[in-house]
Image: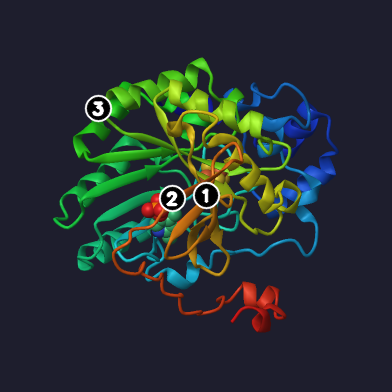
């Protein structure tokens, strides 16, 4: 058994262990654990400095997860866009390919809370069907290997998937989404990166939510990946009591650059059942974006997106930099709030941006907010 598998085996997985370690009511922990899986690697548990801190809130089961009337189980309506169980095909030229149900640790805010840790929902036997689907759809040029966490698979299993994808002519790029460099950096071994680098162009998006997660161990893992020529991006979820202030977020983004990771997205937390206590108002994300752009390196500024409930895809949100725009001029606000005018071209009228046809929200949201039906459209 590899060292990382040994380390994973030492994870906190029993309600009794969690209750003892963090001085919690064991019955309460059991109740949460019946609904939502938990696991915390010893490495990540050691980053917790005190109960309720930003690391703790991401990972320790909380009775608030069982609050009624909070969120929906499949807010992104991924099942709707799932032609075979391991594929989510929502955009014209790329798919999500769910290859592993397990994660090194389980985030309390996970969008796929209903699926992770459940081998019926994401199962290896669906992998070949997924590969067939990708083979048969030549419009797919980008595959995002996801889960769960693909790096939880043994090297040989992951290599089977990557080499199969590489043998498909129309696949231009492969991406892997993984939180392993954050939860279990020891899993990033020389053997792993030597295997990965055979399948370029390969991109990896990692997932860090707080500057304290960037440790010597995670920096080692990230450097190994970067040295193998793998461009690294980061996805962060905006979470109450974790990173919902501009200072923390700015430090996180700056620290990521020091380990050669380019911030890619900040996600508004999805509207998922059992995660209400970790959600923030959308304005908080806009405030954070306003505090990043111009105030620090442009490289440290990701896009702030909401994955639209009902399966609309990711929609970017920006503070209002454009104050007005007409055929003569654009009036804009800079990062310090000063106004500037840019004259439009004199030849011809500016092309109008066509109003998008309003399709209205799709299922789960319709069910959750029937009153919206009349307001939208
Ligand atoms: C996020 C996502 C993608 C990738 O989106 P990018 O903006 O290209 O990173 C693809 N498919 C689905 C279903 C997604 O949720
Ligand atoms: S690592 Fe990703 S898939 Fe796994 S529990 Fe966390 S958010 Fe969900």
The reply to whether discs 1 and 3 touch (Cβ–Cβ < 8 Å) is: no
Quadrant of ligand 2: it is: top right
Q: Vertically, is 126 above or below 225?
A: below
**How was the colour assigned to the protein in this rendering?**
rainbow
Query: Label 1 near label 2: C-beta < 8 Å?
Result: yes
Q: Which residue is mark 2?
A: 342
- Which residue carries the number 3 mark? 194
From this view, report whether residue 19 is shown above or below residue 287.
Answer: above
Q: Quick check: is the Cβ at mark 3 less than 8 Å away from ligand 2?
A: no
Q: Is residue 182 left or right of residue 243?
A: left
The residue mark sitting in front, 3 or 2, is: 2
Q: Residue at x 66, y 77 (%)?
A: 367
Find the distance from the CA under tag 1 to the CA under tag 3.
48 Å
Residue 186: % across, % down: 45, 23
Mark 3 falls on what kind of element?
helix
Residue 294: x and y in percent read: 52, 34
**Real-space Cα distance between discs 2 and 1?**
8 Å
Sequence-wise first label, 2 or 1: 1
Q: Nearer the viewer, residue 150 or 351?
A: 351
Q: Nearer the viewer, residue 6 or 63?
A: 63
The residue located at (52%, 37%) in the rendering is 293
Query: Residue 41: in sight, yes or no?
Result: no
Question: Which residue has dot 1 on it?
Answer: 332
Q: What is the x, y in percent for residue 235?
A: 49, 41
Looking at the image, which residue is at 41% across and 37% down?
233
Q: Residue furthest bottom?
A: 374
Q: Please rate how many residues cluster around mark 1, counting C-alpha atoms within 10 Å: few if below 14, some from 14 to 19, many from 20.
A: some
């Amino acid at each position: 058994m590899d060292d990382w598998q040994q380390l994973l085996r030492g994870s906190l997985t029993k309600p009794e262990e969690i209750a003892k370690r963090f001085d919690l009511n064991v019955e309460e922990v059991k109740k949460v654990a019946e609904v939502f899986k938990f696991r915390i690697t010893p490495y990540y548990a050691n980053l917790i400095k005190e109960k309720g801190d930003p690391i703790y809130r991401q990972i320790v089961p909380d009775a608030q997860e069982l609050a009624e009337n909070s969120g929906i189980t499949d807010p992104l309506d991924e099942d709707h866009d799932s032609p075979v169980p391991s594929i989510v095909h929502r955009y014209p030229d790329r798919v999500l390919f769910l290859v592993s149900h397990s994660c090194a640790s389980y985030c309390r805010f996970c969008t796929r809370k209903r699926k992770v840790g459940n081998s019926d929902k994401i199962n290896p036997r669906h992998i070949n069907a997924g590969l067939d689907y990708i083979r048969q759809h030549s419009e797919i040029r980008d595959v995002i290997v996801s889960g769960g966490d693909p790096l939880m698979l043994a090297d040989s299993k992951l290599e089977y998937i990557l080499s199969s994808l590489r043998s498909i002519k129309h696949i231009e790029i492969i991406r892997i989404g993984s939180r392993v460099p954050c939860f279990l950096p020891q899993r990033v071994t020389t053997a792993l990166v030597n295997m990965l680098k055979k399948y370029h162009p390969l991109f990896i998006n990692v997932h860090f939510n707080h500057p304290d997660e960037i440790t010597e161990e995670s920096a080692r893992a990230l450097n190994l990946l970067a040295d193998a020529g793998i461009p690294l991006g980061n996805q962060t979820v905006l979470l109450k009591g974790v990173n919902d202030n501009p200072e923390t977020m700015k430090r996180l983004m700056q620290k990521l650059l020091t380990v050669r990771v380019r911030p890619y997205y900040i996600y508004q937390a999805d509207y998922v059942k059992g995660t209400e206590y970790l959600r923030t108002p959308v304005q908080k994300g806009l405030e954070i974006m306003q505090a990043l752009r111009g105030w620090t390196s442009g490289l440290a500024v990701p896009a702030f997106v909401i994955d639209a409930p009902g399966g609309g895809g990711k929609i970017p949100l920006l503070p209002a930099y454009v104050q007005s725009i007409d055929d003569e001029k654009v009036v804009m606000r800079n990062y310090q709030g000063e106004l500037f005018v840019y004259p439009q071209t004199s030849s011809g009228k500016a092309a109008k941006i066509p109003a998008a046809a309003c399709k209205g929200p799709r299922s789960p949201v319709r069910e959750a907010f029937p009153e919206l039906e009349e307001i939208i459209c």
